[in-house]
Image (cartoon, rainbow, N blue to C red):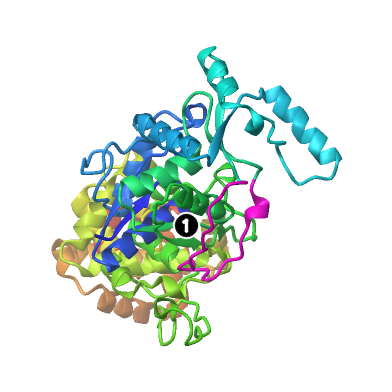
Amino acid sequence: MVLLRFAPSPTGALHLGGLRTALYNYLYARKLGGKWILRIEDTDATRTVPGAVDGIRDALEWAGLEYDYGPGKEGPHAPYFQSERLDLYQSYAHKLLDRGHAYRCFCSPDTLAATRERLARTGSNSTYDKACLHLTEEEVARRVRAGEKSVVRLNDGRLPTRSTPPDLVFKYLKDAHASLPTDPVLLKSDLFPTYHLASVVDDHEMGITHVVRGEEWLPSLPLHLDLYACLSLPPPLFAHLPLLLNPDGSKMSKRKGDVQVLDYQRRGWEPGAILNWLALAGWGIQHEEVSSSSSSSLSTAGKQAPDSTAVMTLPDMVEAFDLSVITHRRSVLDPVKLEYLNKHHLMRVMESKDGFRTLAERAHVRVKEHFPDSQYTTVPYLMHVISTLQGRIMNLNDISTLAPYFFVEPDLTTDEALKMWKSLPAGQYTLVVQNLSQRLDVEGENWDSLHFADILHEEMSKIGIKLKDYMTILRHALTGMKAGPGISDILLVLGHERSMERLRKAQTTA
């Protein structure tokens, strides 16, 4: 069975790069009819952040990425926390020791630091002098019995011959052993594994068939393939995803802010739009056709990728997903594209059955936070507001900022309102407001059935005022803002009593 895994470390909140990796694991697993695992790589206790695992799970749930096995969804590969699998890693470390592919190193941190400095002064690229490699078995056994602390290192001088299989994204890779440290540590002195040993062991033990992970792990790939070869294990297929960049071209980082999934959730973005945005980051590049002598599984001939702004649901992404059309270059996350996608995802929700209620229920908490004293924040009322603002809302949070006058009285002392006032023709403000007030006062009993467009046109014709000036006066009186939905829609949402009150107040203001 095709089985993939998303294996974050609980060192903080899930960020966009991690969510993109989880998404691609989800899409590829579903595309191939397989499953995927959430595995928590928590072997570095010093970096573990309390609550991080719950945060990761919550972010995946919010995004709609349901994993098949993992914390809270026990299965045949449990446990799913690496800290609960230590005996397994130690067992594999002993296998490497027995085969001569690894050895114990008793050097202290101070000794190692001095060794690195000495080697660097000589111009050597080595990071360790292999001093402990030459210890006899008797000496090693004696020091272990004496309780001396040691680590287990890979013996990179006794590596079996192996090949480098093509990467599913980058295709053929050059051997990068030169970038690896000398005899990398596999098992630390506290008996916890390094990422390299734990990752290889878990991927094999769990039956992982495809590893889809970030480009930052490409330098470690030779070490991981070496470990598979030393243990006589078949490696999975690898796919490394190019990194995501900030709009300024810098590498996305948790330390720079605005990259946590929680940030986007709080700011009202649609989870479907976020996934759509991440999926299309670097997806859609047409590579040159691979030569006929190459493996047929690597051919990209005839592969079609979605447009860079294609609005896609999760099922759409699964159907279209193809690793062979992922760019080899790092991709910039364009916030303007997110706004475009989010607007269209909101419109899709509105088109669905009960869409307005769904959005209103989600917006209720945000609107209430913005206007805690307003009595006009009920879900039915918000449904009316959202319907009126349809096509203008880019983000759910826009409901509060685009049309605050639906929830509280307009502030006619703002710079925007005062600028509108100064632009109006002198002497006509009061006339316009009075005439409309009188007309609506007579016909207001059947407010919801009034044809406001006809009424406004008739009253405007009576006064003989330009359309732009007439509508600007009413917009100022009712909202204090120069942009928004049509006056007819605003009157309908505000209702009889609130509309009349604002028109009467505007007369005194003028």
Q: Residue at x 48, y 85 (%)?
A: 293
- For label 1, the crowd category at 10 Å Cα-Cα, with few meaning under 14, some 14 to 19 and many 20 or more, is few
Quadrant housing residue 359: bottom left
Residue 168 on the magenta segment: yes
Q: Residue at x 65, y 60 (%)?
A: 248
- Label 1: which residue? 510
Q: Position of residue 214 (x, y in %)?
A: 50, 56
Quadrant housing residue 406: bottom left
> Along the horizontal axis of the image, is 365 left or right of 310?
left
Q: Residue 501 or 217: which is nearer the viewer? A: 217
Q: How many labels, in total?
A: 1
Q: Residue at x 45, y 80 (%)?
A: 466
Q: Position of residue 110 (x, y in %)?
A: 72, 23
Which quadrant does the N terminus fall into?
A: bottom left
Above-or-below relation of 453 to 123: below
Q: Position of residue 464 (x, y in %)?
A: 41, 81
The prevailing secondary structure element of the residues shown in magenta is loop
What segment carries the magenta color? 157-180
* Residue that protrudes farthest toward the top in the picture: 146
Query: Could one spot residue 366 in this view of the protein?
Result: no
Query: Could one spot residue 5 in this view of the protein?
Result: yes
Identify which amino acid the numbered label 1 is placed on: Ala
Quadrant housing residue 111: top right
Label 1, secondary structure: give it: loop
Above-or-below relation of 99 to 65: above
